[in-house]
Image (spheres, helix red, strand yellow):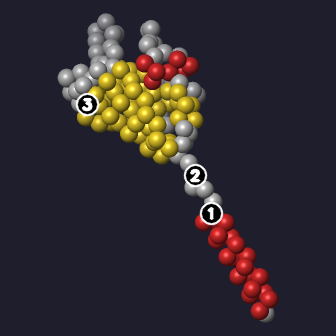
């Protein structure tokens, strides 16, 4: 009986020790510094997308953030993101309606930005122009409102 108890105890102790030493899953934190923020106020909204969801306006972003817009720079922190390749879309929601608004000519009525300061032509820039790599740990990018 002592042998069984000893073997069982040893196996249990070994299991708990290996579990305690197993590395915690690595996640990333992304700090987004948004420059050229308008003094019109409102909210700054950012959304993080993968390549698969970048072009789909109805897709759910990997992460989002909304904070009051502060001139001249607003900072938003997104946490607990899996490392990988992403693209970021942002806009200054002047009227706080949660939507990117257009004027009667269908031109943007609110300021916007993309990661890598990618510029759109008639639509969002291609993912390859906006993509960046998010590593485990702390990451920071700076974008400029257009």
Q: Residues within 10 Å of mark 2 (few under 14, many from 20)?
A: few
Q: Which mark is residue 25?
A: 2
Answer whether residue 75 is visible to the viewer in this image. Answer: yes
Please identify, in this view, whether the residue under mark 2 or under mark 1 is nearer the observer: 1
Q: Are marks 2 and 1 in contact (CB under 8 Å)?
A: no
- Residue under the image location 24 percent in, 21 percent down: 38
Query: How far apart are the two marked residues, 2 and 1, measured between alpha carbons?
Result: 12 Å
Answer whether residue 64 is visible to the viewer in this image. Answer: no
Q: Secondary structure at mark 1?
A: helix
Q: Which mark is residue 85?
A: none
The front one of 106 and 80 is: 80
Q: Are marks 3 and 1 in contact (CB under 8 Å)?
A: no
Q: Secondary structure at mark 2?
A: loop
Q: Where, quadrant-wise, is the C terminus in this rendering?
A: top left
Residue lying furthest left? 40
Q: Are marks 3 and 2 in contact (CB under 8 Å)?
A: no
Q: Residues within 10 Å of mark 3 (few under 14, many from 20)?
A: many
Q: Secondary structure at mark 3?
A: loop
Question: Is 42 drawn above or below residue 104 in the view shown?
Answer: below
- Residue under the image location 25 percent in, 34 percent down: 68
Asked where in the image residue 22 lies, by quadrant, the reply is bottom right
Question: Is 43 drawn above or below residue 101 in the view shown?
Answer: below
- Residue under the image location 25 percent in, 30 percent down: 69
Q: Residues within 10 Å of mark 1 (few under 14, many from 20)?
A: few
Q: Which mark is residue 69?
A: 3
Question: Is 3 drawn above or below residue 94 in the view shown?
Answer: below
Q: With 58 as the anchor, is 43 left or right in this view?
A: left
Ranked by sequence position, the earlier of labels 3 and 1 is 1
Quickly name the residue at label 1. 21
Query: How far apart are the two marked residues, 3 and 2, measured between alpha carbons?
Result: 33 Å
Please identify, in this view, whether the residue under mark 3 or under mark 1 is nearer the observer: 1
């Amino acid at each position: 009986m002592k042998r069984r108890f000893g073997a069982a105890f040893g196996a249990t102790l070994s299991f708990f020790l290996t579990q305690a030493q197993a590395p915690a899953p690595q996640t990333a934190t992304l700090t987004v510094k948004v420059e050229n923020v308008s003094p019109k106020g409102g909210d700054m909204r950012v959304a993080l997308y993968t390549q698969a969801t970048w072009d789909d306006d109805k897709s759910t972003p990997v992460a989002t953030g909304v904070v009051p817009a502060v001139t001249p720079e607003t900072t938003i922190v997104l946490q607990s993101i899996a490392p990988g390749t992403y693209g970021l879309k942002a806009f200054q929601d002047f009227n706080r309606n949660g939507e990117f608004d257009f004027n009667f000519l269908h031109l943007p009525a609110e300021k916007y930005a993309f990661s890598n300061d990618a510029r759109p032509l008639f639509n969002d820039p291609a993912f390859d122009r906006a993509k960046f790599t998010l590593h485990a740990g702390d990451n920071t990018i700076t974008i400029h409102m257009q």
